[in-house]
Amino acid sequence: MRFLRPFTPAVAVCALLLASGCAAKKGLIVEPSKPEIVYDATPVSVLHGKASYYYGRWIGRLTANGETYRATDVTAAHKTLPFNTMVRVTNLKNGKSVIVRINNRGPYVKGRILDLSLVAAQKIEMTTAGVVPVKAEILKRIDVVAKPNVKLTASEKRAAEKRLAQAAKEAREKKAKQSPGLSKVFSFLRPAQ
């Protein structure tokens, strides 16, 4: 035992050095960026009809695609659209819209085209009415090439933003030519000047 006494401080220092090398350092872990989800401004198709919403006894039950229904998810039910189809639902009474994901089947009431989750219904302010006329636009996803952790120069970033703004402007102009818009359709509601 006497021969170990001179080595005890050296062993303690080595143990501390080894232990300090195992400590995790915050801020040094770099996670790749998540790709943005972008949808084409021009819908694949447009449906018109009435939408309702559902919750209550459905919470915690399985939906038609096997997910558990949660009132906090922004989802909807449709009779025939493929699961995971993204749909922009616009309340025609107030013009508010929300993008929902199809994960269930229904509604099975004549004249209704969608059953929205509670959160989706709240976002377009239809919970008081219960059933409202809607426009449902089936959206097409645009694949965005994700380059994780790539830094752009200021000029590259400006050029990319300029191209994106131009594409958005062209899409808006194209959409404006295709439909008269809600303001023109409901122009009879404005007071005469």
Image (cartoon, grey):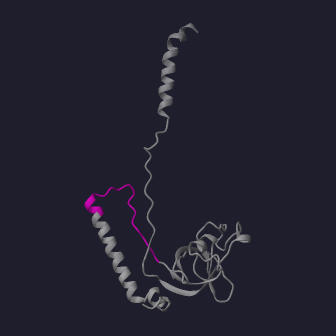
Q: Picture quarter containing residue 174?
A: bottom left
The residue closer to the viewer here, 91 or 143, is 91
Residue 66 drawn at (x, y percent):
66, 69
The residue closer to the viewer here, 47 or 14, is 47
Relative to residue 172, is residue 138 drawn left or right? right
Instruction: Work out whether 105 lies above or below 23.
Output: below
Relative to residue 163, is residue 64 drawn left or right? right
Would residue 75 be seen by someone viewing this image from the given angle?
no
Identify which residue is drawn at 46% across, 68% down. 37
Would residue 99 be seen by someone viewing this image from the given angle?
yes
For the C terminus, the quadrant is bottom left
Residue 47 drawn at (x, y percent):
54, 86
Identify which residue is drawn at 56% across, 7% down. 2
Residue 190 drawn at (x, y percent):
47, 88
Q: Which range of residues does the magenta coloring cover?
A: 140-157
Identify which residue is drawn at 40% across, 84% down. 175
The residue closer to the viewer here, 171 or 185, is 185
Instruction: Work out whether 175 lies above or below 30.
Output: below
Relative to residue 5, is residue 146 drawn left or right? left
